Image (cartoon, rainbow, N blue to C red):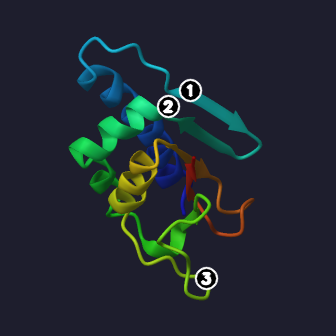
Amino acid sequence: MSRSRMAVAALLVPVAAGAVALLGAGAASAATPYSGNGFVGVNFDQNETRFIADTNAGNLLGPIPDRGWRVNLGPGSVYQPTGNVVYATVDQIVDEAASHGGRVSITLSDPALWNGTYVTGFQRW
């Protein structure tokens, strides 16, 4: 991924967090940004995860190529991988986390440092 594409991808995290905050209409936002060596991300709390699920906002990340994704599923997820492949959309993963009363996180990474992965999704419950 070129530096310019990585920069554009890095902008998606704060934009997504801002959209959740604006669309939450008065709800206190607990979206928490984080960063480290070669990555930046945002943790969404349980209410924000429910909002993302209810609005199908996970579909906004659908155009990202599959080979750039990595997913860390919650315990007992119905989307357990076949080999190294998880057959689920981002929206399905968010919906599942919300149905468990859980939360999601999204991390954008420098693929040169993280074995070609540039987007990682996490489910937690």
Measuring from the top left, give residue 93's x and y in whole percent: 42, 59
Which residue is depicted at the point 40% across and 30% down? 47
Secondary structure of the residue carrying tag 3 is: loop
76 relative to 47 in the view: left or right: right
| Residue count near mark 2 (Cα–Cα under 10 Å), binned few <14, some 14–19, many ≥20 | many
Residue 39, placed above or below residue 26: below
Mark 2 residue type: Asp
Q: Which residue is mark 2?
A: 45
Q: Is residue 13 visible?
A: yes
84 and 53: which one is in front? 53
16 relative to 44 in the view: left or right: left
Residue 32, placed above or below residue 104: above
Mark 1 residue type: Thr
Between discs 3 and 2, the one toward the N terminus:
2
| Residue count near mark 3 (Cα–Cα under 10 Å), binned few <14, some 14–19, many ≥20 | few
- Tell me, yes or no, whether the two marked residues, 3 and 2, touch with CB atoms within 8 Å: no
Which residue is depicted at the point 65% across and 54% down? 110
Measuring from the top left, give residue 73's x and y in whole percent: 58, 62
Secondary structure of the residue carrying tag 1 is: strand
Between discs 1 and 3, the one toward the N terminus:
1
Which residue is depicted at the point 54% across and 36% down? 42
Q: Which residue is mark 1?
A: 32
Q: Quadrant of residue 14?
A: top left
| Residue count near mark 1 (Cα–Cα under 10 Å), binned few <14, some 14–19, many ≥20 | few
Q: Quadrant of residue 11?
A: top left
27 and 107: which one is in front? 27
